[in-house]
Amino acid sequence: MQIEDLTRRSFNRRTALKAGAAAALASQTVLLEQLAIVPSRPAFAAPAFPDIQFDNGAFVHGPATFNDGAGNVVAQFGVTFTLLVPARLTRNPTRTDQSRLANALATIEAVFPASPSGVLITSVSYGLPYFNRLPAALVASRMPRLTSNTSRFVLEESPAFPTDVSASNPGIAKDRFTNQVVIERNDLLFEFRSDSVNNLQQVINWLEGSNVLNGFFVPSPAFGGLIAFQSP
């Protein structure tokens, strides 16, 4: 797909989805970086890592005042690219596996600056398939429940909703989007953010065994086939 295809007024979302499905993230890197306008950010000292996920606000500059001649505008630019990588486990993880994953994430944070110009690890999320690997009594004793119905956990599998294109909704059709909703069975979801698609590409390549991170030789984590990364 050429950059001109993406700038036509008649371009539709399905065309982008087809292009993205045709190849891995590597084939989209140049295209995405052509499309994006990366804000100019002054360097600043990164704070300590937060103790909760998603809390990246301190690593991105706050609102600033801009004036292009038509008056002042206050705006804040978020991180340009977000990479969501679902993953399935090929077996039940051990304590050693847990340590290897923690060390891998710590290595990424040590090699790349924790900033939009580097890589921000926003979250590592866990799905029901992961919790189904654990003893049911253990999960039941620690999983939060709905305050309105304590017989239900706060984490439930998503259904196909009434307006989704799905076999369970034969009367629903969309003009431009006809893909059937598929509820995937992933154990994990990694969320990485950066102003550089190349940085994100290096992270996923490294996790899959490239031994290269931020242009340096860094041994990839020895997951032993535990994690099967899915298409981002």
Image (cartoon, helix red, strand yellow):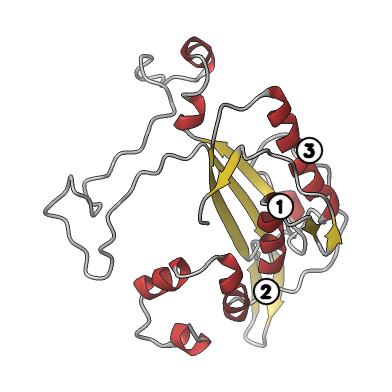
Nearer to the camera, 26 or 173: 26
Which three-letter amino acid code belongs to the residue tagged 2?
Val
Horizontal and vertical percent for residue 127?
A: 49, 34
x then y, percent, for residue 3: 52, 86
- Sequence-first disc among 2 and 1: 2
Q: Nearer the viewer, residue 209 or 173?
A: 209
Residue 68 placement, left or right of 179: right
Disc 3 designates what residue?
103
Left or right relative to 231: residue 61: right
Residue found farthest to the left: 171
Q: Nearer the viewer, mark 1 or mark 3?
A: 1
Relative to 8, say whether 124 is above or below: above
Query: Which is nearer the N-term, disc 1 or disc 3?
Result: 3
Q: Residues within 10 Å of mark 2 (few under 14, many from 20)?
A: some
Task: Identify residue for label 1.
Answer: 209
Q: Earlier in the sequence, mark 3 or mark 2?
A: 2
- Seen in the picture, residue 84 relative to 80 is either above or below; the reply is above
Query: Is 223 situated left or right of 4 in this image?
Result: right
Q: Amino acid at mark 3?
A: Asn
How far apart are the alpha carbons under marks 2 and 1? 29 Å
| Image quadrant where residue 28 sits | bottom right
Q: Eyeballing the image, is 194 above or below 124?
A: below
- CB contact under 8 Å: marks 3 and 2: no
Check disc 2 and report the residue beneath it: 38
Q: CA distance from mark 1 to mark 3?
A: 15 Å
Tag 1 secondary structure = loop
Amino acid tagged 1: Gly
Q: Write down the quadrant of residue 205 in the picture.
A: bottom right
Q: Residue at x 11, y 54 (%)?
A: 171
- Mark count: 3
Q: Residue at x 63, y 43 (%)?
A: 123
* Residue drawn at (69%, 48%) of the image: 121
